[in-house]
Image (cartoon, helix red, strand yellow):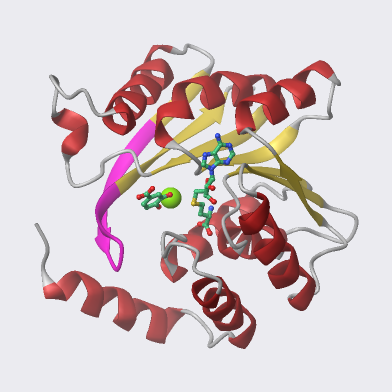
């Protein structure tokens, strides 16, 4: 399932709407040179994350799944002076590449990477009584998403947003009998979001340079 127009339209949208950005291009080049998988958010998705952070006037952002820090860069750039982004990453090698990318972007003063399994890092944030976040972006391992959403709920302020990437994955989300842990994780997090009276939610299907996928958004009730 693919149509060449999906990519063409994404490139068109990027060319008319988004400024050329040597820092973001250098980020992607460094991540590919280091052998990191090309699963960063697309430029138009990164721009949406930035707009959401700006609309929330976010001063505290939490990301789960750093990779090379591409989405991190889009998000951290939305922070005002003194703002803070914490990004959680399992792989030390990914975190090293991301740290270099963030330093090159001049964002290492506000973006911090914590290495380790996200479930443990989130539990540590909860138990340490960390100040609530305005925006949480879940984009690590998909089987973990139901658990990450439950922890993100405890870490997001009323009026804050939780965005969950990759919940459609070529439409596999409707494969009811699927034993694929990623599909089960996506169905699990969507069902948890839908059943949670404390949030307003929706999810959208997307096509583009990353194929056919989608994302879900939860607004924590005031
Ligand atoms: N948000 C990034 C892409 C993240 S890719 C961007 O758009 O630029 C998913 C990342 O999650 C990978 O770097 C992977 O190593 C990491 N990951 C996988 N399992 C994890 C876990 N249990 N805890 C934390 N990070 C994990
Ligand atoms: C994969 C992960 C992602 O976060 C993504 O946006 C696309 C693909 C993956 O693990 O295949
Ligand atoms: Mg993703």
Report the label total.
0
Q: Is residue 56 visible?
A: yes
Which region of the structure is painted magenta? Answer: 202-213
Check residue 159 for magenta coloring: no
Q: Main secondary structure of the magenta part?
A: strand
The x, y position of residue 19, in whole percent, is 53, 85
Q: Residue at x 64, y 52 (%)?
A: 53
Residue 161 in the image, given as x and y percentages of width and height: 58, 36
- Residue 156 shows up from this direction: no
Q: Is residue 175 left or right of residue 194?
A: left
**Is 184 placed above or below 99 here?**
above
Res 9 → quadrant:
bottom left
Q: Residue at x 88, y 62 (%)?
A: 109
14, above or below 145, in the image: below
Q: Quadrant of the C terminus?
A: top right
Quadrant in which the N terminus is drawn: bottom left
Seen from the viewer's position, the closer of residues 150 and 31 is: 31
Residue 82 drawn at (x, y percent): 90, 55
Q: Residue at x 82, y 64 (%)?
A: 108
Relative placement, left or right, of 11 versus 17 is left
Q: In the rendering, at what x and y percent does residue 31 appear? A: 55, 71
Residue 122 position (above or below residue 49): above
Q: Nearer the viewer, residue 45 or 166?
A: 166
The residue that appears at 58% across and 22% down in the rendered structure is 221
Q: Quadrant of residue 186?
A: top left
């Amino acid at each position: 399932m693919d149509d060449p127009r999906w990519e063409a339209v994404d490139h068109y949208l990027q060319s008319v709407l988004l400024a050329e950005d040597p820092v973001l291009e250098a980020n992607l080049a460094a991540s590919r040179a280091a052998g990191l998988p090309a699963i960063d958010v697309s430029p138009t998705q990164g721009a949406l994350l930035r707009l959401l952070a700006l609309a929330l006037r976010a001063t505290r952002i939490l990301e789960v799944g750093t990779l090379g820090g591409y989405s991190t860069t889009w998000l951290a750039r939305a922070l005002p002076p003194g703002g803070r982004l914490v990004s959680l990453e399992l792989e030390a090698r990914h975190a090293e590449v991301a740290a270099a990318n963030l330093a090159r972007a001049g964002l290492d003063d506000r973006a911090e990477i914590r290495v380790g399994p996200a479930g443990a890092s989130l539990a540590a944030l909860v138990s340490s009584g960390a100040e609530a976040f305005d925006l949480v972006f879940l984009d690590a391992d998909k089987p973990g998403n139901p658990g990450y959403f439950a922890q993100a709920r405890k870490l997001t302020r009323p009026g804050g947003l939780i965005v969950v990437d990759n919940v459609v994955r070529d439409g596999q989300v409707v494969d009811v009998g699927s034993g694929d842990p990623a599909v089960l994780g996506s169905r699990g997090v969507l069902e948890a979001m839908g059943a949670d009276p404390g949030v307003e939610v929706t999810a959208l299907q997307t096509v583009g340079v990353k194929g056919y996928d989608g994302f879900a958004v939860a607004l924590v009730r005031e």
